[in-house]
Image (cartoon, rainbow, N blue to C red):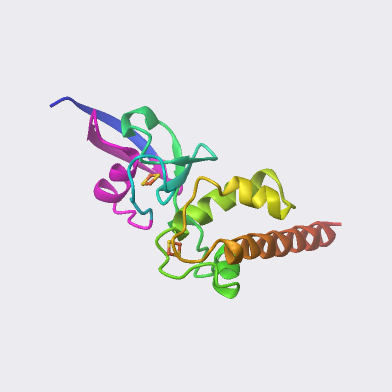
Amino acid sequence: MTTHDITLTVNGTAHDLTVESRTLLVHALRDDLGHTGTNVGCETSMCGACTVLVDDEAVKSCTLLAVACDGSEVQTVESLVDGGELHPLQEAFAQEHGLQCGFCTPGMLMTSLDLLAHDSDPSREEIREALEGNLCRCTGYQNIVNAVESAAQTMRAATDGGDRGGD
Ligand code: FES
Ligand code: FES
């Protein structure tokens, strides 16, 4: 069994770990580092439940070998809560009933985070396109789109308020 010593920075903390050649990023995150907020569903790149950000890009962590991520910055759903405060996306998913069983939610949140980092005011169509690789068996998607739209509004308002405050 070939192993590799790698470093992953997860949610701002650097971790040295030893992984097998075949270890998937999602398993390194969950099993080696205890970040179980990232769900693992299909393991075939279909469902999006395992989505995290790697070097600021949303990726399905079941499609990446951990060894290929050596030296990368990874952001998981656990990073969204800040000092006990939910992220606006989390608030919006709760308010707009964007989840039921919650299995898809970590991936939905991280894909949405990536979308809003690149486009602060996406159309409903753009939200649907961004989330097309994330499957939800419960909600019918409408409330998820509502939630992302609502979070985008909240985040824009916060940015505008911050800009005014800095004047
Ligand atoms: S578990 Fe990765 S896409 Fe389904
Ligand atoms: S809330 Fe159950 S799969 Fe999406």
Task: Please state, as top left, top right, bottom left or bottom right, where the C terminus lies in the image.
Answer: bottom right
Quarter of the view holding residue 150: bottom right
Query: For the point 45% across and 70% down, which residue is it?
Result: 100
Please state the horizontal and vertical placement of residue 154, each as a whole percent of the image: 71, 65
**Residue 97, percent from left and from top:** 55, 72
Left or right of residue 9: residue 141? right
Give the magenta range.
Answer: 9-37
Q: Residue furthest left?
A: 1
Residue 22: percent from the left, percent from the top? 24, 31
Front one among 128 and 76: 128
- In the picture, which quadrant includes the N terminus? top left
**x, y percentage for residue 84?**
49, 70
Task: Classify the position of ligand 2 by quadrant: top left, top right, bottom left or bottom right.
Answer: bottom left
User: Which residue is more in the foreground, 166 or 135?
Assistant: 135
Residue at image point 50% right, 63% down = 81
Q: Is residue 49 left or right of residue 24?
A: right
Q: Is residue 30 magenta?
A: yes
* Left or right, residue 39 beside residue 140: left
Which residue, as the protein is rendered here, is positioned at the far right? 167
Task: From this view, report whether residue 97 is shown above or below residue 80.
Answer: below
Q: Is residue 29 magenta?
A: yes
Residue ID at (56%, 67%): 93
